Amino acid sequence: MDLIVIGINHKTAPVEIREKLSFSPKEIIEANRLLKESVFLKESLILSTCNRVEIYALCDRGKDYLSGIKSFLGRYHGLGLSEYEERMYVREGREAVEHLFSVAAGLDSMVIGEMEISGQVKKAYQDARQGLSTGKVLNRLFEKALNTAKKIRTKTFIGQGAVSVSSVAVRLAEKILGRLDDKTVLIIGTGAVGEQLLLYLRKNDVKSILVTNRTLEKAQGLADTARATAVAFENFLDRLVDVDIVIASAGAPHHIIHKNDIASLMPRRKQQPLFIIDLAVPRDVDAGVNTVDNAYLYDIDDLKRIVDENMSLRKNELGDCSRIIGNAADIFMGWMAKENPAPSYRRRTAEEGVKGEM
Amino acid sequence: MPEFNFHILHQAIYLKIHSITIHIGYIAFFAASLAASLYIIQDNALKNKMIGVIFSRLPSLSFLDKLNYRSICLGFPMLTISVISGLIWAKNVYGIYWRGYNSRHFYSLILWLIYALILHVRLSARLGGRKVALLSIAAFFVIILTLFGACP
């Protein structure tokens, strides 16, 4: 029996094609059942996320099931084969096992090492079990895949380090300030990047948010969407006494926060640390602010550089990850050979057994 | 039956108080300086924007700062009690309180002043964070000097 995977992902197909071939959560259980019955597969499983549609199948050796699976996808979604056939990749046997293991660990994802995919693989596995399309082999394969993903996450740095500007900013804030749920954020200006970061901070449960802008109405507008308080631009410097995180994204032609402002502020803040994120270009905050004790200034390039560093840090871990995957695949293939011996192998052992008895 | 010597008992109590408090005090100061060292490492990383793997394993600045503060808050009264009981014990044994500038007494007094200064600048918010961390690392070197550099 043969284990195969056939599918498309973000590397081989644009979103226009992926979305046409994807299965919605509502139809996935039924689709699993339909696929197995219509193509006469021993076991099958559909993994459908926004970045990939893959079909894992166990089928009899020596017959062509690929065209059956491919045309099932076309029939199900009402698409012509030519629209997607050349985008599809196929892996068999050990390669299929290794492919699933790296997908489940997030090594095949758009953002390497992201965690979400493990949950999606688990969900796909549960759905397929519910559709009664998997059996002994795929069950064991997917449980192994989830275990291996967990092992990779704990034994390597693949999921370490934030890899988006917002998550880097939050991670830094936590490094400086500890818990965020008793901290106050002030945002200056109403730029899109700043707003995005603000909502991300809101998700991380900061205590309160202040918004200021040269035109108070705009500040009020953002304050309403982010459940925040608007502050008049003229006295935002005074409010900094109680603020822990400043996000500057005002489109000003000159600095609006100077080194002296912060230096004279520090005794009034009782030397509590202040984290300033300058997202504006040209910059809103004088770079000298970073030399003031207990003030930490990061501009957009600093954050982007950290994102890049963390990304390459993750890429460095790929070697270790593939070693872990190789070992896990060895174990699984060993189990497969014992459970489902290839015909030639079975005959030989039978003969030997007979000889031994004589 | 020999007469019980209350004088010796007295001495023993002061010595015991002295040794217990000074041990707790030194351990607290050690924790404070350890937290301070990690604070400086992390502060440098944050200021220079060198964010590596070690960085992600360290606790937050505010945690280290709190640990430093609370350890000193524990260590300082311990040091105070220990210096006083040590002085009384020394008076009983040697007959004098003050034994010159190369003695542990003198170094302990300096130590006491340094930690008093740290608590003062901290509570008055004159300095905070990095400078306090540097001070408590410096204070720990004085502890080592007190332990190994001075006549007992």
Image: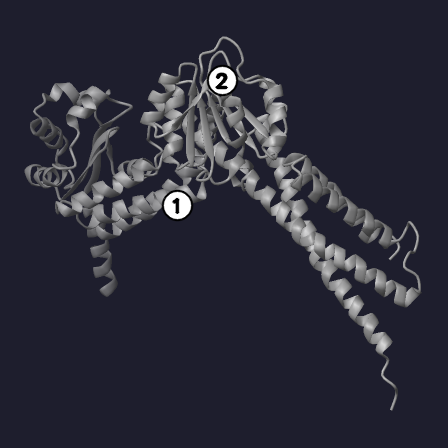
User: Is A266 placed above or below A122 here?
Assistant: above
Secondary structure found at label 1: helix
Q: Residue at x 14, y 38 (%)?
A: A28
Left or right of residue A69, residue A286 in this image: right
> Which quadrant holds residue A290?
top right
Instruction: Please determine whether, in this image, residue A229 is positioned above or below residue A354.
Output: above
What is the chain identity of the residue bearing mark 2? A
Percent x, y of residue A76 = 8, 30
Q: Secondary structure at mark 2?
A: helix
Q: Residues within 10 Å of mark 2 (few under 14, many from 20)?
A: few
Read off the chain for label 1.
Answer: A
Amino acid type, mark 1 = Lys
Residue occupying image coordinates x 66% and y 50%: B73
Q: From the viewer's perspective, tell me whether residue A260 is left or right of residue A232.
A: right
- Where is residue B36? Give x, y as percent: 65, 42
A181 or B134: nearer the viewer: A181
Q: Which residue is mark 1?
A: A151
Give the mark, 2 or 1, whose residue is nearer the N terminus. Answer: 1
Q: Mark 1 packing: few (<14 Cα in 10 Å), some, or many (20+)?
A: some
User: In the rendered image, which quarter contains the N terminus of chain A?
Assistant: top left
For the point 26% across and 38% down, the residue is A120
Q: Position of residue B3 (x, y in %)?
A: 88, 86
Labelled disc at residue A234: 2
Q: Is residue A17 above or below residue A274?
A: above
Q: Amino acid at mark 2?
A: Glu
The residue that appears at 9% across and 41% down in the rendered structure is: A33
Mark nearer the viewer, 2 or 1: 2
Observer able to see residue A316: no
